[in-house]
Image (spheres, coloured by chain):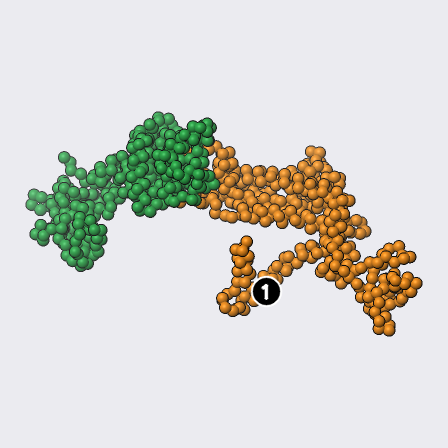
Amino acid sequence: MGNTASLIKNIVTQKKYKEKYHWTDYFSYFYLFLGVFLMFGPIIWLGLSSVKTLAGIQEYPPTILPLSQIQVEVDGYEKPLSLYNVTLEDGSTKELAEIKRVGITSKMVDPKDTEKKYKIPIDKREKIREFSVQWDNYLDPLRKYNFLLYFKNSIFVTVIATIITLIINSMAAYALSIYEFRGKNIALVFVIGTLLIPLTIILVPVFYVIANFGMINSLWGVILPGAATPTGVFLLRQYMLTLPRELIEAARMDHASEWAIYWRIVLPLSIPAIAVLAIFSIMWRWNDFLWPLIVLSKSEVYTLQIALNAFHGELTSQWNYVLAMTMVTLLPIALIFTYLQKFITTGIASTGMK
Amino acid sequence: MTEIVLKNIFKSYDQTEVIHGVDLKVESGKFLVLVGPSGCGKSTLLRIIAGLERITSGEILIEGNEVSNIPASERGLAMVFQSYALYPHMSVYKNMAFSLENLKIDKKTIEEKVNSAAKLLQIEDYLQRKPKALSGGQRQRVAIGRAIVRDPKAFLFDEPLSNLDAELRVTMRKELSALHEKIGGTMIYVTHDQVEAMTLADQIVVLNEGYVAQAGAPLDLYNNPNDTFVAGFIGSPKMNFMNVKSIKKDDEINLKSESLNIKSSVDVEVNTDYTLGIRPEHIYICEKNDSDLEATVDYSEQLGSETYFYCNTHDASQLIVHQTGQYKVAKGDKLFLRFDRSSIHLFGVDGKAIKNKS
């Protein structure tokens, strides 16, 4: 670990000259920090906001940290009241709870002496905050809304769809790159051609097909239509074209059938490209919203993305739950990416040559 | 034991014809070398035999059976590629077992065969390693091992030694030769290196631009080349060529150039242009009185046991002279040279050799 620490220290303190900082160093760091801020800022905001109260999220001006105003129970009032530090006319300060706000004045009460009421201009008071983490944002949806089921549905769709996608796409890519047959180029043009057609255009026909197969409100209805992606076929084909031709010929000389060449030679050597496609497919499936929304209308087959949408009512949105569950949906993708990215190393295929 | 016969093979890519009617016969158990400069079609011819390229017309017979429509995987031949083409994700053992597994042979037999092939090639110690952990020579052995493990009808080698360094190449050449002796088997070997061809072959086929220039035993080709191409290609350094004209003088016919004038030992027509060929080792350094011509040393290569002189003559053609032993010669020195009369080759203007009618 000491090694890693010193390596990281070495990386983050890199500069152009050993002794002093050059202006390009300042510029590079500025640029990189800007990039990190732009890309990572929203995620940090999401993470911090997911543990705020609903009031905390909607507060103006917004806060970065999950600070929430202290609420107190006051006798004679049904709801808890918000606590403020108020500067009175005589210059002294006092903690008061707000009963009601009218225009720029606020009707307030002393929680210790409920008989005494005050009318305070709103610029004379200040919110009393405390640092509080609302874990309930995470726990409530899991308890009340059966989020674990949606989680399971999403995992099922993502895993099965990705496996099917990888198998179908790699077989198609093999046919279009290595297997020799008449009409290969025409087939390729058709596959690439479908890249030009967005989902929205074929939404209705595909829906009819799915409906006729009786797959409405079934997870298979989500999985199957997108199982073969032209992008994936194209990506794998391009990679397979770079495999040394002599390897394939050597396998042919070794009595290998086309299936054996595909399964035992081409597939293992295409792992880097397959890892890339796996990451893509997992992201597509996990974040897919439009198609599942159309196919799935019963809550027991909801995927996470559809379930998140359910937090938006007609009039109100439960933003605290939405943000917390968004955080939950992000995590698996991040973990899978860190695991799969190590397979995206190229140049494995040529190590047996020369 | 397998005999391979090619009959009138033509091969074109689109409009370009690259093999123009090649006839070839590889006798059972023989080591045949296809040799020629790059682009002469030798690799294409090998791939045609292997089944990796389809022919445009002609016949390929393996053990008497026509195979031109049979795919590579069913011809029963084994091939060693120039790049070795070892499967990088498999261990050496798996690499060698792959073909046997494809033939659905039981595990125990596979193990026996792989182990005996490994023993033969002395690669037993690294059967579990991946190809990238092997040196060039070791990879070469594995590639050969992969070929011999399944007792193929014939072995095809596509420039297998060209990626090795010079020293290793010599060692592997000897081993290949020994291997052929040990396991027999018909072997077809492609190379551009005429030294490999001379040392390995029972029979050499010299290819030039898609034609067979000459086929025969190595020394036959060396001693009796059919034309200037074969004469120039076989032998290193190259045979010397000089343009000469036949002149009748008294009862004799002399071959004459600006610097040379010697009696012809073959019957030639008078007043005709010929190309005279003589190998570097058939030129001797002698006294002025015995000499055929005088040359100036331009450059010399001292190899210790032997010396090569690159000399300029008056008719501007460069002569390479080979001498055993060491010589103290500087650039610009004059040498008197004599040609070995019995080793002079004569070629017509069309490049074809002029042979004695007797």
The picture places residue A325, in percent across and down from the top left corner, at: 71, 49
* Residue B43 shows in this picture: no
Rendered view: B292 above or below A63: above
Between B91 and A175, the one nearer to me in the picture: B91
Tell me the colour chain A is drawn in.
Answer: orange
Residue A235: image quadrant is: top right
Residue at the far bottom: name it: A90
Say which element carries label 1.
helix
| Label 1: how many Cα within 10 Å (few below 14, some 14–19, many 20+) | few
User: Mark 1 — residue?
Assistant: A30
Quadrant for the C terminus of chain B, please: top left
> Residue B80 versus residue A101: which sits nearer the camera?
A101
Residue found 82% across the figure and 66% down from its top: A85
Q: Quadrant of residue B356?
A: top left
- Front residue (pair A211, B121): B121
The percent coordinates of residue B15 (x first, y second) are 40, 41
Q: How many marks?
A: 1
Outermost residue toward the top in this view? B64
- Residue at 59% in and 64% down: A30
Q: Chain of mark 1?
A: A
Hue used for the chain lettered B: green
Using residue A227 as the reference point, say whether residue A148 is left or right of it. right
Residue A101 locus on image (x, y percent)? 86, 62
* Residue type at tag 1: Phe
Closer to us: A105 or A283: A105
Looking at the image, which residue is at 26% across and 40% down? B198
